[in-house]
Each structure stands twice: as structure tokens, then as C-alpha cells.
């Protein structure tokens, strides 16, 4: 617990490093909007390509309930 508190206080007071705007280099729409979010997120609605997920069921595993 003390390590957590020390790290939190140290990071907030001394380091003050700003995070990247997209640290994971994600292409999803929520990472393409700047922070703070403007009133109109996009000039026009982004085109999304929706594909069904290809899920493979493991052998011997059935849906639970």
C-alpha cells in the first residue's frame, strides 16, 4: 500500500509526464478524437465497416447458462 501511495504522489508532483494522445496506436474512432472532445466530434459521420466476428468454439465446450 505504501509503494502505491508513494508512486502516486511522486508521479503527480514530481514527474508530471503527459501521456500520448493515442498510446496504443489504435485506429478505432474513440482514439481519433482530440481531448477534450469538441462539440462536434467529426465533420461528418465516420464510415464504419462492420463484419461479423469469426468465433471458433473450442472442442468440447458448450454454451453455458
Image (spheres, rainbow, N blue to C red):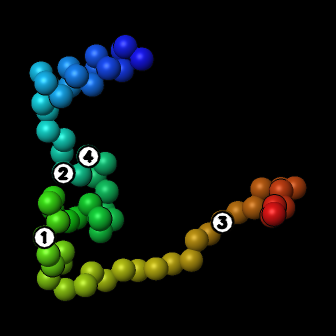
Q: Could you tell me how far apart the alpha carbons at marks 4 and 2 are, in whole angstroms?
A: 6 Å
User: In terms of image quadrants, where is residue 18?
Assistant: top left
- Which of the two discs, 3 and 1, labels the residue nearer the N terminus? 1
Tag 3 near tag 1, CB within 8 Å: no
Question: On the image, numbered disc 1 is attached to which residue?
Answer: 38
Q: Nearer the viewer, residue 62 or 40?
A: 40
Mark 4 or mark 3, which has the lower sequence index? 4
For mark 4, what is the residue?
Answer: 23
Secondary structure beneath dot 3 equals loop
Mark 3 nearby-residue class (10 Å; few <14, some 14–19, many ≥20): few
Q: Which residue is mark 3?
A: 55
Answer with the quarter of the image where residue 36 lies. Answer: bottom left
Q: Which mark is residue 21?
A: 2
11 vs 58, left or right, is left
Q: Residue furthest bottom?
A: 44
Is the residue marked by circle 1 packed among few (<14), some (14-19), or many (20+) residues within 10 Å? Answer: few
3D distance between C-alphas at marks 4 and 3: 28 Å
The mark lying in front, picked from 1 and 4, is 1
Residue under the point 37% across and 13% down = 2
Upstream in sequence: badge 1 or badge 4 = 4
Amino acid at each position: 500500500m505504501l509503494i502505491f501511495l508513494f508512486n502516486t504522489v511522486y508521479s503527480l508532483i514530481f514527474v508530471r509526464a503527459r501521456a500520448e494522445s493515442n498510446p496504443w496506436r489504435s485506429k478505432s474512432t474513440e482514439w481519433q478524437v482530440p481531448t477534450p472532445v469538441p462539440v462536434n466530434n467529426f465533420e461528418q459521420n465516420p464510415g464504419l465497416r462492420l463484419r461479423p466476428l469469426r468465433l471458433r468454439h473450442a472442442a468440447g465446450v458448450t454454451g453455458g447458462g
